[in-house]
């Protein structure tokens, strides 16, 4: 059985206009072969905007059809980690499945949304006479995911005895720990101890600074026990910001937000925060409550906030947070509310709406009301993608005109918007920056370090250089490019 322990990343690539380009963040999926078991972790999707149509693409490996998978783990709900789970599970009814309760609840929202987007894109393609993209998963597969008898969810943080949890005797000598990874509500790192003593520490997307949940560098000793000292440690780390140093301390970024809001209030404008649906909206609410202004929330972000913030009902009840009318039968009322808030009829508010790219979602529908008013400020607080409307807005001069597309009564129509409001980008990443990522490796002292979720070669090299200069660098340091088999 020597050399039967190995790792392969199957999603470290992007599809750009239909061409596979390795070495970028795509739809993550890890494959681990350890002590005779096959373990898959995460199953995301990548997005390729192929001209007008968004195409969702899968990690490599054809969902491992024809192979046996013993266990499927999920780190968190973001679509690049969870978007193709229903398809993977469907092909592996033999696999046990484990994730945190909040990751499961949030994944439901992500998958429903992804289903909805795929449906809309198919409709758009049909209208434009283009080939209809194949959906990543079917309704039937989605249903199986929700009702899979092999699925267990646990509250963080927890060590799982698989034999006990799944009433089996096939997992003697295995221990699996799930611990909060800081990055998002329910986001987990996995700590796997195999019967041969090997240990795998898979960070998942991780943050040591506070996001919507407290940051985590490493779990405490009580959780870890002898994890890092009792056997050979293989660490699999994300490195989204591996090449990036934190430009300024978190406290300063928070102060900037406060400052932007205060100045906009003094000018009599509103603050517009186009937001990613998952995690970011809740984070922004928590960072804005002390400012005392009404926080308006609109779009899919509301569904995620319900999962993420236990206190949301209370905040709505006492008027600190206002959800735009959600009843699908009261669409006119919803639009009346939107127009009142975006036109400033209720004074200064903080308006959080999905999505962050402004390419789609309710944020792009209300943007034409907000962007032309010079009293307002638009603030982007997440990663800005290259092909996004957000990127264009950040780069054009004030007063210039922007072409956006709008869905009006089921038809896509171009509209021209004059961008005269203030536009800012706060780098408030919910991933660790280089310093945090390196410090975690220094503390864990793994024998082998596998890097993934890395946005390109320059970023990997910058990260690797820092790792190699640690006092006790890992013996092996490898970029988990998709398809590369890495022996432990
Ligand atoms: Zn994530």
Image (cartoon, rainbow, N blue to C red):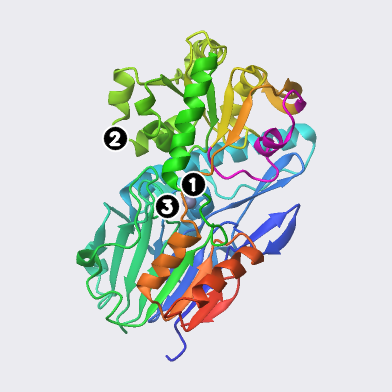
User: Which quadrant would residue 235 be assigned to in this image?
Assistant: bottom left
Looking at the picture, tell me which residue is in the foreground, 102 or 374.
374
Is residue 482 shown left or right of residue 236? Answer: right
Is residue 174 shown left or right of residue 302? Answer: left
Discs 1/2, front? 2
- Give how far across and how far down residue 190 sits, in percent: 36, 64
Residue 388 colored in magenta in the image: yes
* Residue assigned mark 2: 310
User: Which quadrant would residue 322 be assigned to in this image?
Assistant: top left
Mark 2 lies within 8 Å of ligand 1 (Cβ measured)? no
How far is the residue under mark 3 from the one under mark 1?
22 Å
Position of 364 relative to 81 (above/below): above
Residue 69 visible in the snapshot: no
How far is the residue under mark 2 from the one under mark 3?
18 Å
Mark 1 lies within 8 Å of ligand 1 (Cβ measured)? no
The residue at 44%/38% (across/down) is 254
Extent of the magenta region? 381-402
- Give how far across and how far down residue 346 sits, in percent: 47, 10
* Residue assigned mark 3: 76
* Residue assigned mark 1: 140
User: Which quadrant would residue 367 be assigned to in this image?
Assistant: top right
Verify CB contact (< 8 Å) between mark 1 and mark 2: no
Viewport quadrant of the N terminus? bottom left
Looking at the picture, tell me which residue is in the foreground, 246 or 175.
246
**Mark 3 Cα shell of 10 Å, populated few (<14), some (14-19), many (≥20):** many
């Amino acid at each position: 059985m020597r050399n039967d322990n190995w790792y392969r990343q199957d999603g470290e690539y992007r599809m750009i206009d239909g061409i596979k380009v390795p070495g970028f963040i795509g739809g993550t999926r890890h494959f681990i072969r350890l002590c005779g078991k096959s373990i898959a972790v995460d199953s995301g999707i990548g997005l390729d905007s192929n001209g007008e149509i968004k195409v969702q693409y899968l990690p490599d490996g054809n969902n491992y059809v024809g192979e046996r998978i013993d266990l499927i783990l999920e780190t968190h709900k973001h679509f690049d980690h969870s978007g193709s789970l229903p398809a993977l599970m469907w092909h592996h009814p033999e696999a046990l499945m484990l994730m945190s309760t909040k990751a499961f609840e949030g994944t439901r929202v992500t998958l429903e949304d992804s289903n909805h987007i795929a449906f809309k894109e198919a409709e758009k393609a049909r209208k434009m006479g283009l080939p209809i993209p194949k959906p990543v998963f079917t309704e039937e597969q989605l249903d199986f995911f929700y009702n899979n008898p092999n699925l267990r969810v646990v509250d963080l943080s927890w060590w799982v005895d698989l034999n006990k949890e799944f009433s089996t005797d096939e997992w003697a000598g295995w221990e699996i720990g799930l611990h909060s990874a800081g990055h998002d509500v329910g986001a987990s790192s996995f700590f796997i101890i195999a019967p041969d003593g090997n240990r795998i520490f898979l960070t998942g997307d991780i943050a040591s600074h506070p996001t919507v949940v407290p940051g985590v560098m490493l779990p405490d000793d009580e959780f870890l026990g002898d994890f890092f000292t009792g056997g050979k440690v293989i660490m699999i780390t994300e490195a989204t910001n591996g090449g990036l140093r934190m430009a300024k301390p978190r406290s300063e970024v928070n102060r900037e937000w406060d400052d932007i809001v205060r100045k906009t209030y003094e000018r009599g404008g509103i603050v517009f925060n186009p937001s990613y649906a998952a995690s970011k909206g809740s984070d922004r609410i928590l960072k804005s409550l002390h400012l005392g202004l009404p926080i308006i929330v609109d779009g899919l972000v509301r569904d995620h906030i319900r999962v993420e913030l236990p206190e949301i009902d209370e905040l709505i009840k006492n008027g600190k947070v206002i959800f735009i009318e959600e009843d699908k039968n009261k669409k006119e009322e919803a639009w009346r509310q939107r127009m009142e808030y975006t036109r400033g009829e209720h004074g200064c508010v903080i308006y959080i709406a999905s999505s962050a790219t402004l390419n789609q979602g309710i944020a792009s529908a209300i943007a034409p009301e907000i962007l032309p008013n010079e009293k307002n400020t638009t603030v982007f607080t997440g990663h800005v993608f290259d092909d996004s409307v957000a990127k264009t807005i950040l780069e054009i001069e004030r007063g210039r005109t922007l072409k956006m597309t709008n869905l009006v009564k089921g038809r896509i129509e171009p509209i021209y918007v004059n961008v005269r409001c203030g536009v800012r980008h706060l780098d408030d990443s919910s991933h660790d920056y280089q310093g945090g990522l390196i410090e975690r490796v220094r503390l864990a002292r793994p024998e082998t370090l596998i890097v993934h979720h890395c946005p390109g070669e320059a970023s990997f090299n910058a990260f690797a250089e820092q790792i190699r200069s640690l006092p006790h660098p890992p013996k092996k340091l490898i970029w988990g490019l998709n398809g590369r088999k890495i022996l432990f």
